[in-house]
Amino acid sequence: MSRRTLWKRAHVLPCARFHTMRHDHWRVEVPVAYSRHRRTPRKGTMPSPKQPAVPRIDVERHQRALLAAAADVLARDPDSSMADVAQAANLTRATLYRHFSNRQTLLKAIQAEALTRASETLLACRLDDGNALEVLGRVIGALGKHGMRFRIILMKASDSSPRFLTQRDQVLAPVVEVVKRGQLEGDIRSDLSPEWIVTAMASLLIAAVRAAPTTKQSDVDVSDLIFRTLVGGIATGGSESENTEAENTEAKNTEAKNTEAKN
């Protein structure tokens, strides 16, 4: 080892911060203060400050707005694009894609939201209070009020996953139990499957939701129309003889109108 190296090592301050560098072919430890190769930041090249994170309350508000808009847009047109959803929510497509990377992710989020809201709505309908027809009236009124939002849970979409369909059936299972109770109590026809009755109720809700913008009916009127239509087909009060008589009366009225038209 050369004298130069020994001298530098002997004069290194014990508390100094060391920086390793190469002088020719020797590896010499010298204090940072003595190093001519230390890097100093250039003027005007300070690192840019980190962008502030978006407040969580804004993230949640954007997500709620996107889910609400997507539920409405996709209910009217299942083939709507992500751009249509962003426009309906008054947000940019960049904001939409920050929350949902693709259309499938958005659809799953809507389905999860619909399942949660539908379950909460059914619990608020007091399913054990009153006879089965009264309960069905409350269920139809509650779901009809939020028809656009719940349409995705009521319809049997061909591209829905088996897991979602199973979860949807679990949410609607209490309504099936209400129908079964009505059949045991004699308020609902027992020759109809409870599952089919619930499916028919869902189909009527979907039809009413689709027709609502054109008919300009209120939520109460739509729910009442659905209830009367459903009860007319499942209630035990409507006997076959009464139905036959109504059909005969309608046929006579049609025949009379045709006769007047010919004359």
Image (spheres, rainbow, N blue to C red):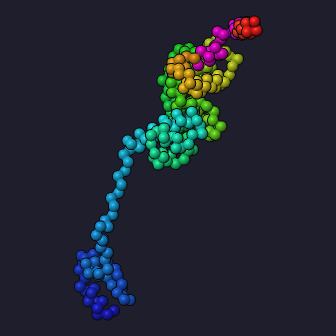
Residue 257: give x, y in percent of width and height.
71, 8
Question: Going by the image, does 30 lie left or right of 216?
Answer: left
Q: Quadrant of residue 190?
A: top right
Q: Look at the image and say whether residue 121 sits in the magenta stretch.
A: no
Residue 227: give x, y in percent of width and height.
58, 17
Residue 183: give x, y in percent of width and height.
64, 16
Q: Which residues are magenta?
A: 226-249
Dominant SS type (magenta): helix
Q: Look at the image and say whether residue 241 sits in the magenta stretch.
A: yes
Q: Closest to the observer: 33 or 87?
A: 87
Residue 234: give x, y in percent of width and height.
65, 16
Q: Closest to the observer: 241 or 127?
A: 241
Q: Residue at x 60, y 39 (%)?
A: 79
Q: Closest to the observer: 211 or 196?
A: 211
User: Which quadrant, please, contains the C terminus?
Assistant: top right
Q: Is residue 174 visible in this depiction of the protein?
A: no
Q: Closest to the observer: 215 or 102?
A: 215
